[in-house]
Image (cartoon, rainbow, N blue to C red):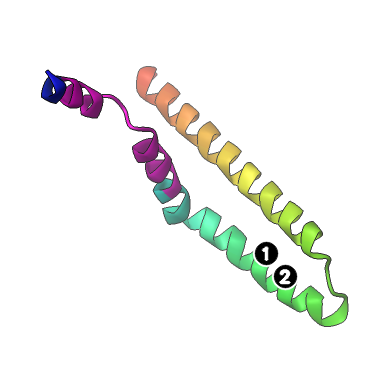
Amino acid sequence: MQEENRKKEYGKPNVFKAMFGGLKAYLTDWRNLLGHALLGVAFVVIAIWAPINLWLKLAIIACLITLNVLRMKAKSRKQSDKEADPV
């Protein structure tokens, strides 16, 4: 009986699997990598002349991540709409 319950549990979508799949998709997208690389270079260049507060850096990085996630969702939604309506 317990083995059957375990088999049913493994058949369900796993939260960690979805989370790691999303993280993998985020980290392998070249636009996200480019955005983070450019932001890192900008932080280094700006830090030479005017140091930036740590909390401001974290806020900027959080905004970049949010915008990238929204862009990826919009892209996937647009792609699924194209597949549904090929006209």
Q: Is residue 41 left or right of residue 55?
A: left
Q: x, y percentage for residue 75?
A: 50, 35
Residue 11 badge: none
16 with respect to 3 (left or right): right
Which residue occupies 54% across, 32% down?
74
Q: Position of residue 43 (x, y in %)?
A: 73, 70
Q: Position of residue 30 (x, y in %)?
A: 47, 57
In terms of secondary structure, where does tag 2 sit? helix
Does the segment drawn in magenta span residue 64? Answer: no
Instruction: Please determine whether, in this image, residue 39 is positioned above or below residue 86.
Output: below
Where, quadrant-wise, is the N terminus in this rendering?
top left
State left or right for residue 57 relative to residue 83.
Answer: right
- Within 10 angstroms of label 2, few (less than 14), some, or many (20 or more) residues? few
Disc 1: which residue? 39
Q: Amino acid at mark 2?
A: Ala
Mark 1 in CB contact with mark 2 (< 8 angstroms): yes
> Circle 2 is placed at which residue position?
42
Q: Is residue 52 left or right of residue 71?
A: right
Residue range (magenta): 5-23
- Between 7 and 36, the one lying in front of the other is 7
Q: Residue flagged by tag 1: what amino acid is it?
A: Leu
Write the residue at 39% across / 45% down.
20
